[in-house]
Image (cartoon, rainbow, N blue to C red):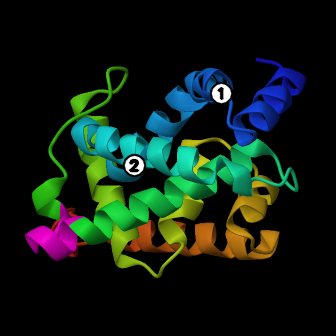
Amino acid sequence: MTKSDQTTQIYAAQAGDGHAFEVLLGDCYDSIYRFAYRWCGNSTDAEDITQQACIKLAQNIRQFRFESAFSSWLYRLVINCAKDWYKSQNRHQHQNIEDWIEPESAPDQSAENGIYLQQVLRLLDQLADGFKETALLVHGEGLTHAEAAEILQLKESTISWRLHEIRKQLQLLQQQPDGSWEHSL
C-alpha cells in the first residue's frame, strides 16, 4: 500500500469505516506480529500480544494525528501492548521470564539463534526500562537511531547510549569464566 493509500485508509478508519480499518489492519498485521515476536521470542505469546495490539489499534485509531509516521505510532502501540502483556503475565502467573519464554525459533532461524535470542531477551529484561525496545527497534526492526528516537520520544544520543550500554553488558557476559550466560542471568 502506498503512503497516500495508507493515509486515505487511516482517515476513513478514523471516520468509522470498518472496511477501511480492515484493509489498514491487513496491511500492517505482519509488522505488528513481527515486532511482537521479537519482543517476546515466542510465537504463542506474540500472537497474544498481536491480538491485544489489534484491539488497541481499533480502539485508538482516532488518536493518530499524522504528527509522525503511522509506523512510528504503531510501534509505540505494540511496545505498550507488549509491556502490558508482560506485566499481566508476571502478575497472574508469578513466573520468571525464563519460565514463559519457550525454546523456539522463527522459521528462518536456527535453534542456536533461538537460544541466543532468549538469552538476549533475558538480559534486556534485567536492564532499565526502555533498553529492550531500543534494541528491538534498532537491531530487530533495522531502524536508524533517529527513527527509534522518534518512536520512543527520546534524543538520538539516548538511543546511542542505550545501545552502547547493551553491548557493554553483552561483552561482560561473554567474558564469564565458564562461558555461560545463564549463571549471570
**Category of crowding for the residue at label 1, using alpha-carbon neighbours closer than 10 angstroms: few (below 14), some (14–19), many (at least 20):** many
Q: Secondary structure at mark 1?
A: helix
The residue located at (41%, 58%) in the rendering is 82
Give the answer, above or below, for where 48 lies relative to 85.
above
Q: Identify residue for label 2.
A: 52
The residue under label 1 is which amino acid type? Leu
Q: Where's residue 93, x and y in %? A: 9, 68
Determine if the magenta segment contains residue 112. Answer: no
The residue located at (22%, 31%) in the rendering is 111
On the rendered structure, is 52 left or right of 156?
left
Q: Identify residue for label 1.
A: 24
Q: Which residues are magenta?
A: 89-97
Tag 1 near tag 2, CB within 8 Å: no
The answer to whether residue 136 is seen in the rendering is: no
Q: Secondary structure at mark 2?
A: helix
The image shows a total of numbered marks equal to 2
User: Which image quadrant: the N terminus?
Assistant: top right
Which disc, if any, is residue 93?
none
The residue located at (72%, 76%) in the rendering is 158
Q: Where's residue 18, x and y in %? A: 61, 28
The answer to whether residue 6 is seen in the rendering is: yes
Give the answer, above or below, for where 60 lies relative to 90.
above
In the rendered image, which quarter is residue 47 located in? top left
Task: Decide which of tag 1 and tag 2 comes sooner along the chain.
Answer: 1
